[in-house]
Image: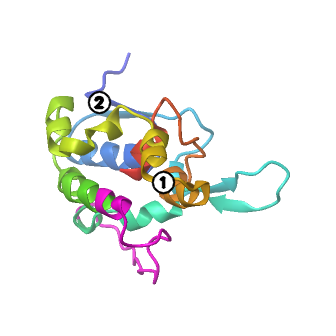
Amino acid sequence: MSRYDAVIIGGGHNGLVAATMLARAGLGVLVLERGERLGGAAVSERVFAGVDANVSKYSYLVSLFPAALRRELGLSVELRPRAVGSYPPAGDGFDGLRARLATAVAPTLLAPLRSRDEFLRLLGDDAWIVSEPLSVELERAFDDDVRRGIELTDATIGTFAPADDPQLRQNRCLL
């Protein structure tokens, strides 16, 4: 029987990066993927039944790939900014929420994983995002379903999760 120092569950982009970093550190790594191929968000596939079109479910995530990590992995990828980053109207409370979350979470992306308590302290008043479905906050913030839908785009794109998903996939995507 082989022995590994680390077992990575999931051969998506995050799993492959983790496996690469661990292997470069001299550890024996096993990647387990339940799908037929590796790549996760980095692949295109048919996501709508009966529609003959391949779509990259998460191509927008490439823009979140930290430059420092791209350099460390030796990847030569040119990322181009788009003119519009998001479609929600500016100047409301959700703008503030997105800015606060980005300010709190972005510096942790390349740091060692924090404990739940540390992360909750880091989020402060916005800690609801790790325990309460986004739909609850959207109901509090907006009276209009159209506006909720616009805000929900950034939280569900690629996840196909409902706003009230108890697994909080939509919250993780928004983060």
Q: Is residue 65 magenta?
A: no
Identify which residue is drawn at 52% across, 48% down.
Answer: 40
The N terminus: image quadrant? top left
Which badge, 2 or 1, is on the more N-terminal residue?
Answer: 2
Question: x, y (%) of residue 56?
Answer: 60, 60
Identify which residue is drawn at 46% across, 79% down.
Answer: 84
Identify which residue is drawn at 29% across, 61% down.
Answer: 96
When the figure is inspected, residue 106 is found, relative to residue 129, above or below; the finding is: below
Q: Is residue 143 visible?
A: yes
Q: How many marks?
A: 2
When the figure is inspected, residue 33 is found, relative to residue 77, above or below; the finding is: above
Q: Nearer the viewer, residue 83 or 100?
A: 100
What residue does disc 1 label?
142
What residue does disc 2 label?
6
When the figure is inspected, residue 81 is found, relative to residue 13, above or below; the finding is: below
Q: How is the image coloured?
A: rainbow
Identify which residue is drawn at 41% across, 80% down.
Answer: 81
Q: Main secondary structure of the magenta part?
A: loop
